[in-house]
Image: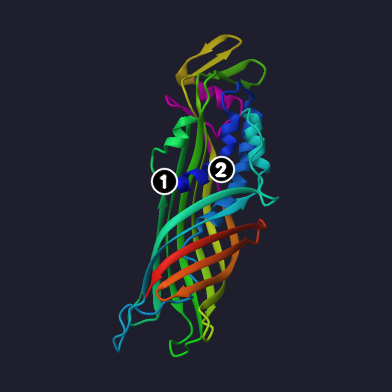
Amino acid sequence: MKKFGKVLIVGMVMFLLAAGSVFSVDLEDLQKTVSGFSENMAKSLPFNSTMGLNWSDAYIGQFIKLPPGIPGLGVGLSFGVTFLDIGDMNKILGIFGGGNSIDVSGLGLPLPGYTFEGRLGGFILPFDIGFKFGALPEAIPLLERFDIGLDYMLIGGDIRYSVIPDKVPVIKASVGLGVNHLSGGVSKIIKEEQIFRIGDDYTLAVGNPTVGLRWKTTSVELKAQTSVKLPLVPIIPYLGAGFNFAKSNAGYAIDSKITMTGSDGSVDSKDMLSKLKEFGFTDIAISDKGIESLLDNTAWNMRLFGGFSLKMAVIHLDLTGMYNVFTQNYGMTFGIRLQL
């Protein structure tokens, strides 16, 4: 778990670049940038949430069999990365005084993930069900050393129905329905006062804030998959496709005490929100904890996935490649599982 936390730091290292810099931000520019960032994440986050449960076998068989036989079940671990476009990410980092995010060989910003997962065959009807879960501990020492916070949770499941009879031993095919929920974020403590300009006469000031990007998505996916058991070869190749609809939100949060000042003096805390609305900022929330702007978006997404597994007795090693059709981004996962 700790090693995986270090991998996540590499993917989100751009917040190290924003350490300790004083920024003066035009609030209107920030909100325009956040809007683009949120729209981009609505297309990229559902793709990331589909990591896990991409097993080579399109159908693992029934758990309860007549006549009795080896039950279909398995447990495992998978981890991997998907890539997202860095344009809006770099813009928002520039506004917050940071540098550029990491672009891996032109593929984009790596967004890692992992899951513990299990799959159980059905009974009577030829179906199987799968569950997956991944999360990071609240405290990671290496992150705390740099005043960085990181959140990650992925949970999901699916049900697949075999469309080829079990008496056909070589080829398997299934159609399925999956649900995935992903939430996360990265934050950095800035040890200087930061200023937000509002028009020509007003400013918002936050002292020693914790600046963070936050995101979450929930998607429902229809998918289909086929796999082939090659005679006398312990390799199972597979191909699949998924089409999903996702509701996401993404944006920023700044945790700090806030003061607002205009040409006519300080603005009372209870009047700050109404003053922002006067300037047209209806997508910002202000509370005792600070400022937050999380924008909702919905998006249709389509992915292709495929790869192969190497079977050694009851141990399977999976290698999966993924392609986001609408954003033209890539991803890959590696998994190890015990499957009967």
In the rendered structure, the answer to whether residue 202 lies left or right of residue 76 reads right
Q: Where residue 185 is drawn, which disc sits there?
A: none
Residue at 61% x, 37% y is 34
39 shown above or below 164: above
Q: Position of residue 149 (x, y in %)?
A: 46, 35
> Is residue 33 part of the magenta span, yes or no?
no
How far separated are the C-alphas under marks 1 and 2?
15 Å
Q: What amino acid type is highlighted by mark number 1?
A: Leu
143 shown above or below 181: above
Residue 75 visible in the picture: yes
Q: Earlier in the sequence, mark 1 or mark 2?
A: 2
Q: Which image quarter: residue 263?
A: top right
Q: Nearer the viewer, residue 282 or 211?
A: 211
Residue at 57% x, 34% y is 15
In the rendered structure, the answer to whether residue 313 lies left or right of residue 281 reads left
Q: Where residue 10 is drawn, which disc sits there?
A: 2
Residue span colored magenta: 272-297
Q: Where residue 136 is drawn, which disc sits there?
A: 1
Q: What amino acid type is highlighted by mark number 2?
A: Val
